[in-house]
Each structure stands twice: as structure tokens, then as C-alpha cells.
Amino acid sequence: MIVIRSPREIEQMKRSNVIVAEVFESLRDLISPGVTTRELDRVAEEIIRSKGASPAFKGYRGFPASICVSINEEVVHGIPSDHRRLKEGDIVSLDVGANLNGYFGDGAITLPVGEIDKTASRLVEVTERSLYIGIEKARAGNRLFDISYAIQTWVESHGFSVVRDFVGHGIGRDLHEDPQIPNFGPPHQGPRLAPGMVLALEPMVNEGTYEVKILADRWTVVTADGKRSAHFEHTIVVTDNGAEILSQL
């Protein structure tokens, strides 16, 4: 069941999502060669808790950290570590969630570490643009898969692939709610979008094959061919006038 959120609930979710955006602003300044992924996790948790919220991911289904930090071929759910340091030329995906007063915020960005090569730069740019192309289709009266089709078409037209095994989702009182939002599929299909639906759109785009596998830690998702992946996510609310992005300052 897709929940239609009240204006009061949407305002609560906006507060949760602004915290997520504030975390990204702080982490951007930390991204540099030599920084450990655990340090990014520590700073993120400090910011989230300083706002009176709790990290949405910590303990979620047993996840051991506050944020997900995924480097290069890691698609999503990378576990921060004291032993993993960022290197010049890496791309690093940060996935952050916050729970404030029982309402969730969720977002993701992929950032360069120092200078990156042209293919990595194009991968990041195409992935970020695909998110906004999807958001443009999140209009009342459209179908859910209009979002999916728009993302897939853009990504594949640039020679990249969209991950099939992990998708976007509804969000609200729970971190993951109905509907599931694939980043691929036929247009004009799926539930009709209505004002008050709150959705977390999150294209995950691979340099090579869309196929992925999960590492022995049972969390970290990597590309099956070892090529790089990028990930962007915004939480949005559908309105009569298009979509409003909640996870931004």
C-alpha cells in the first residue's frame, strides 16, 4: 500500500531530509586521499545525533555502521572501516539516512577523490543527471514506471547500465515502504502517481554490466565485472506541480 502523507507529515520528513543534506555538505569537505571510511561514518553520526536524530541505517537489519560508503566497483552498502582509506582517483558513494521523530530521510551522492579519469567523471555526471530526469517524471497523473523508463533510457543512451537487483522505494514512517521503484522498465505502467506520495529515487549506474554480486560480509554489493558504479538519491514528494526535493538544503 502506498501511503499518502499529510502536509504535517511532509514537513516532518523535510526536517529529516535536511539533516541528510547537511551531512553531505560536511562530508564533501572531508573527501580526500588518506581519509578512512570509518572517519566519514563517525562525522556523519555526530552530525545526525547533534540534530536530535538517529542514524537510520545503524542496526537496520543488522547493518553495523551509520552510513554506507562504497568505493569504485562497490555499488551500495559498503561498510565503513578503519582500514579502508580513500585514494586519489577513486569515486566514493555515500548513502545517508536519518530518523527524526519517527520520520525518515534518505539520500546518496557519489564524489570524486582528487582527480578522476574521464570515464569515471562521465559515469558520475550521467548518474546524477539520470536522478533529475527521473524526478522530472514524478508528476501527479504519471505512472511510476515513467520514472523508471526515463532513467534507463538516459543511462543506456550514454553506454552505461542500470542495476536491476536494487531499486528505489517509498519512505515515511519506515525507511523502506511501498512502492518499489526500479530504475528500468516500460513507460505508462505501474501505480498512478498522486500528490502526497513520498519517494526515494536512487539510480545505481554501472560502467559495465548491470549484474552485481554480494561479498562475503553479506552487505557490500559490487559489480560482477569489477567495473565502477555510481549512486545518487533524493527523497521527493509528489505535488500537483511536479516533485519537491526534500533532501536538499
Image (cartoon, rainbow, N blue to C red):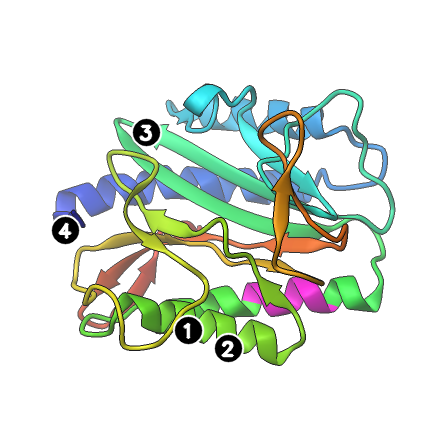
Estimate how packed mark 1 is, as few (under 14), some (14 to 19) or many (20 or more) residues with alpha carbons within 10 Å.
many
Q: Which of these two is toward me, 191 or 58?
A: 191
Q: Amino acid at mark 4?
A: Ile
Estimate how packed mark 3 is, as few (under 14), some (14 to 19) or many (20 or more) residues with alpha carbons within 10 Å.
many
Q: Which mark is residue 100?
A: 3
State the SS at label 2: helix
Residue 102: % across, % down: 26, 28
Taking the magenta stretch, the answer to whether it contains residue 124 is yes
Residue indicated by mark 4: 4
Residue 59: % across, % down: 46, 19
Q: Which of these two is toward me, 82 or 152?
A: 152
Disc 2 or 4, which lies upstream in sequence?
A: 4
Q: Amino acid at mark 1?
A: Tyr
Name the residue rendered at 21%, 55% in the picture. Answer: 197
Report the span colored magenta: 122-128
Q: Which mark is residue 153?
A: 2
| Mark 2–mark 3 CB contact (< 8 Å) | no
Residue indicated by mark 1: 149
Residue 185: image quadrant is: bottom left
Q: Amino acid at mark 3?
A: Leu
For the residues marked 2 and 4, what is the alpha-carbon distance in whole angstroms? 28 Å
State the SS at label 1: helix
> In this image, 219 relative to 2: left or right?
right
For the residues marked 4 and 3, what is the alpha-carbon distance in whole angstroms? 19 Å
| Mark 2–mark 1 CB contact (< 8 Å) | yes
Q: Main secondary structure of the magenta part?
A: helix
For the residues marked 2 and 1, what is the alpha-carbon distance in whole angstroms? 6 Å
Specify whether residue 56 is in view. Answer: yes
Residue 135: image quadrant is: bottom left
